[in-house]
Image (cartoon, grey):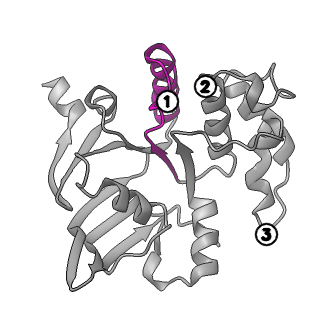
Amino acid sequence: MKLNSDTDAVIEFQDLRREFRMGSEVVRALDGVTFTIRRGEYWAVMGTSGSGKSTLLNVLGCLDRPTSGLYRLAGHDVSDLDDDELSELRSRALGFIFQSFHLIPQLTVLENIEVPLLYRGDDFPGGHDRAIALAERVGLGHRLKHRPSELSGGQQQRVAIARALMNDPAVLLADEATGNLDSATAKEILALFDSLNSEGKTIVLVTHDREVGRRAEKILHLKDGRVVEIENVRAAAAG
């Protein structure tokens, strides 16, 4: 599956809804959500518990399908894809970074970074060299043979970031990526996100932390499944 590099929009939601039936009631976890994220932008998604953040994240990550409305990812209408096509799009268009790292404990740093290669159906020329370069990019070129248990939390998250970059995804999708880190280490990880974004990588960061959210270019505020505001952080700072 080829990603569409001709369009400036990498994520498009139009009147998107996700409903769940709870007995005789219908819960609208997402209720008419519309927004567009363009290539190279850095967005944060914020909202209180029950606002719809988790559902939005699942739909964004192609782990759940919308009930109605449009979701277009890297030029592909998600609703048009079968499960195999959706899985392929997810593996190529999205790089996931989680709060709990999700590294494989039996594998080394280098092997963990190379994991996405196992899920590609085609050859990935230079994949091994790319994994080494990414380890060096996140400051772990000297720890290639170490296992996760031998790393600090911040180092484990750096491995997870390198792994997420392995397939050169259209979007980095980070879910509370600094939630398990101390404040100093969290700032280092956020500085790495800043650097990746400055190099042109599109980032969507789901967070409950206002200070973390304000590192982004825009903040999408959710409440009761609806977008209540899209805050342009950098424009406000410039003003």
Mark 1 near mark 2, Cβ–Cβ under 8 Å?
yes
User: In the image shown, does 225 or 14 lie closer to the viewer?
Assistant: 225
State which quarter of the image contains the C terminus. Answer: top left
Magenta range is: 171-197
**Would you place residue 177 above or below residue 155 in this image?**
below
User: In the image shown, does 234 or 230 lie closer to the viewer?
Assistant: 230
**Would you place residue 217 above or below residue 79 in this image?**
above
Q: Position of residue 217 (x, y in %)?
A: 30, 36
Kind of residue at badge 1 = Asn
Q: Position of residue 210 (x, y in %)?
A: 26, 31
* Gap in angstroms between the C-alphas marked 2 and 3: 32 Å
Residue found at x 47% / y 85%? 80
Q: Which residue is mark 3?
A: 121
Q: Which residue is mark 1?
A: 180
Badge 2 local density, few (<14 within 10 Å), some, or many (20+)? Answer: some
Residue found at x 56% / y 84%? 82
Badge 1 local density, few (<14 within 10 Å), some, or many (20+)? Answer: some
Q: Which residue is mark 2?
A: 153
Magenta span contains residue 102: no
